[in-house]
Amino acid sequence: MSKKILLLDNVNPLCASEFSARGFEAEQPPKMELDELKEVIGDYSGIVVRSATTVDADLLSHAKNLEVIGRAGVGVDNIDIEAATAHGVLVMNTPDGNTISTAEHTCGMILALSRNIPEAVSKVKSGGWDRKKFMGTEVHGKKLGIIGLGKIGSEVAMRMKTFGMDIIAYDPFATHEHAEELSVELVDLDTLLGQVDYLTVHTPLTDKTRGIISMENADKLKKGMRLVNCARGGIYKEEDLIDLIDQGYIAGIALDVYTQEPPTDGLYEILKHPKIICTPHLGASTEEAQEKVAVQIAQQMADALEKKNYKGSLNSKSISLLTNKEVHPYLELAEKLGRVVSQLKPEHTNQFSFEYTGVCARYAEVLTDSILKGMLTEYVSETVNLINARHYAEDRGFKIKETTSSDDSMYKDLITIRLGDDAEYREISAAVFGPEDYRIVEIDGYGIELRLEGDILIYQNLDKPGMLASVAGALAKQNINIGALSLGRAGKGTQAITAVIVDKQLTEEELKPVFELEGVQHVRYVSLS
């Protein structure tokens, strides 16, 4: 008897055809209510969803025979991957299927903003004309800023280059080689915001990207710039959009994504502004893209159910590791260390060395995946996991050297990452001390012992009386408390490295007094909160 697959959310019919061709029984009923879905899901080995159906722990508790969940698209926010993993259910998506359609939609939004196309269409359809009112501007010769130079950002760059736009980009993980191939200049974020005529974002929504354009940083913007967002709602602060336009900072905005979809009543009022163009999350809504992801997810799921291939899986390694408790602490350590390195490394660095010493050396391959996951999660718009982390690293031109060692040291197991000679901090080592206890133990040869948690301030200073007091005083004046600290030095009166954990996330303004202290240098802030 063939395995049954349930297709939901109006997935393209080619999905059913592909499953049938592979010998599976694919069923595509009309829209199902949740209670009905709970009653029948136990009959299926696979389920395909888009964005409408939420696959959570409650639904999974009814899915006794489910082996694979397929997302016909990129985003998996509606799938509880942790719960699926606990149930031994594979989760798959199709990260490349929407790239071209989203890039094309972004380019269309840029042109629509430039030529006032939506407003002009509405005017003519209502029996009006008024050509002067809809005077536009050429994109030729204008400067386009791209935040996030991954697959979609790169496709946008190539297309708008042919329109004659000068393109600059901000992406800490993009290499200069990749940028040169696209004829794109890499700059820092403030430089980009101050120079561009158009800005498009292709990055995930994280604490670093949320509200990247708002009234708080409006003075950094080139006045009269135009914004496009076909990535994630909330990257531009929605409640500030009208003020940004009315006060002359922004000439126009084109949105395809929102913090809540469909938007709330309050957001709908904002979207009525004549200088805002809005579409209902159409980035991936082309016939070609929907056909492509429908066929791809069917092929991937069929391969997995036939135990041939697990391409596109987001949690297959996680499932295989569930039964191996020994590796779990090292995976946690590796990911945390990756997050630290992502905040310490020089921008555009692409060469790293990972060394594993002791028992953890047995798991070198998967620990490298975990480090890369930690490094890339906040900079890649798709979901990064142990399966695809190397793919995204290779996509950005990373060159990774992995070594293992059984050398005796004072630590049973050690993970060491080397960031290169250009880094302010070139080498960092960490170890597992106990359950949920992961610590940095060495930075550039200086012995440090600090838990990998919270918000960490790292700096170098001359080892002399009063230096720690100066830093603590600068923080205390702002009511910032030090929760833990560790100091490493080579000898009395020499250089020292100090690492402190503070009780809150720090802003640039709060860090400024520390940067200005005499004798304190290479101040770096790392947030793991």
Image (cartoon, helix red, strand yellow):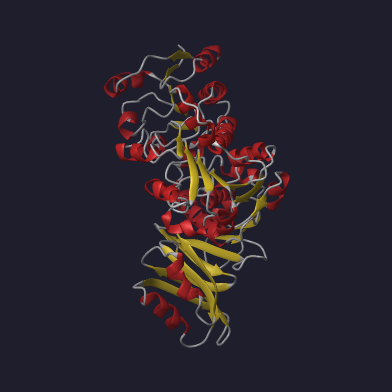
- Asked if residue 2 is positioned above or below residue 251 in the image, the reply reads above
Residue drawn at point x = 49 percent, y = 18 percent: 12
Camera-nearest residue between 17 and 146: 146
- Specify the quadrant that holds the C terminus: bottom left
Q: Residue at x 51, y 29 (%)?
A: 284
The one of 218 and 519 positioned closer to us in this rendering: 218
Counting every numbered tag in the picture gives 0
Residue situated in front as seen by the camera: 322 or 351: 351
State whether residue 328 is above or below residue 443: above
Direction from residue 505 to residue 340 in the image, left or right? right
Residue 417, quarter of picture? bottom right
User: Is residue 97 found left or right of 212 in the rendered image?
Assistant: right
Q: Residue 7: x percent and y percent?
A: 43, 19
Q: Position of residue 517 (x, y in %)?
A: 50, 80
User: In this view of the protein, which residue sits in the foreground, 211 or 392?
Assistant: 211
Residue 157 is situated, as x and y percent measured from the top left of the image, at 64, 41
Please indicate whether residue 490 sits to the left or right of residue 323 in the image: right
State the image quarter where residue 503 is shown. bottom left
Which of the image's four quarters has the N terminus?
top left
Can the viewer see residue 1 in this picture? yes
As drawn, the residue found furthest toward the left would be 35
State whether residue 384 appears in this view. Answer: no
| Image vertical order of residue 363 relative to residue 470, above or below | above
x then y, percent, for residue 317: 51, 39
Please give the name of the residue rendered at 53% of the width and 43% of the height, measured from the top-left corner.
386
Residue at screen point 55% across, 62% down? 344
